[in-house]
Image: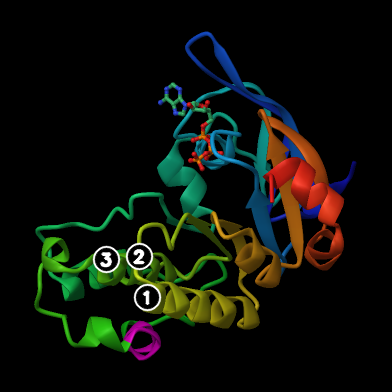
Amino acid sequence: MATEHTALLAAQDLHAHYGQSHILQGISFSLQPGVALGLLGRNGMGKTTLIRTLLAQVRASGGEVWVKGHKVTQERTEHIVRRGIGVVPEGRGVFPNLSVRENLQMAARPGTRGQVDWTFERVLQTFPRLGERLGNGGGQLSGGEQQMLAIGRALMTNPDLLILDEATEGLAPLVVAEIWRVIALIRASGMSTLVVDRNYQKVLAHTDRCLVLEKGRLVLEGASDDLADDEAALHRYLGV
Ligand SMILES: Nc1ncnc2c1ncn2[C@@H]1O[C@H](COP(=O)(O)OP(=O)(O)OP(=O)(O)O)[C@@H](O)[C@H]1O
């Protein structure tokens, strides 16, 4: 497989354990530039663990992770994300004691190709709500506003790949719609995305390809459109 070298992100036979529990059991995939990739699977199948292992927040117990042709399996998270990955973690990760403005400005940096497509102004245009809250502390925001801020912070790093883990979890329907609107906009801009969300229909609609995890193994990989039409697979792997 030649794909690790051209891929933005790739895993080769990746394993991870929590104590004695063998959570990821040999995951291989690659994400090519410009592709929106969905990660699906029922609760507890290993989606968050896969993302955390790719980013070295969980130590891989076997296998390799590659970012743009570099083997990063032994690197620290800060170094891996500096290679062009923006992360919106499950649980958001905004700084509660810093203002919205500070949260955004401290994240700002050019991308790996020197690109500054995402500026403070563009993030505020994308999320007008944040513009009305610039002086508020991150901790004073509603859940939806915090999520917008987390996405805004990730965009300010001008990543080549944006990873969104459960970005709509626990949010009101209007805010959820707003987040999906922005995910569509990011995809249309050509930035690659890796999207995990409980709403499989939205994931299928907003991605080009999908991976399906079951008990720490990749059981299906294919075009999102094809999977959307495959009722048997959706029933079997997602229980819908
Ligand atoms: N810190 C941890 N210590 C021990 N086991 C864990 C830990 N985090 C997750 N697990 C277990 O690892 C397995 C995979 O969890 P993971 O969170 O990766 O699944 P998921 O597919 O993201 O599911 P969910 O949608 O519920 O978050 C589950 O069985 C879970 O109970």
What amino acid type is highlighted by mark number 3?
A: Gln
| Position of 83 relative to 212 (above/below) | below
Q: From the top left corner, tell me how far across and down residue 115 is, in percent.
A: 52, 77
Q: Earlier in the sequence, mark 3 or mark 2?
A: 3
**Helix or strand or loop: what does disc 1 sit on?**
helix
Closest to the observer, 197 or 7: 197
Q: Is the C-beta separation of discs 3 and 2 under 8 Å? A: no
**Helix or strand or loop: what does disc 2 sit on?**
loop
Which marked residue is nearer to the observer: mark 3 or mark 2? 2
From mark 3 to mark 2, how far is it between C-alphas?
10 Å
Q: Is residue 96 left or right of residue 228?
A: left
Q: Measuring 51% from the left and 81% from the top, which residue is drawn there?
A: 181
Q: Earlier in the sequence, mark 1 or mark 3?
A: 3
| Position of 215 relative to 118 (above/below) | above
By secondary structure, the bulk of the magenta-drawn segment is best described as helix
Closest to the observer, 180 or 156: 180
What amino acid type is highlighted by mark number 2?
A: Leu
From mark 1 to mark 2, how far is it between C-alphas?
6 Å
Check disc 2 and report the residue beneath it: 171
Q: Quadrant of the N terminus?
A: top right
Question: Is the CB atom of the residue marked by disc 1 within 8 angstroms of ligand 1's nearest atom?
Answer: no
Q: Is residue 88 magenta?
A: no
**Which segment is the magenta one?**
121-127
Q: Measuring 34% from the left and 64% from the top, which residue is drawn there?
A: 150
Check disc 1 and report the residue beneath it: 175
Check disc 3 and report the residue beneath it: 146
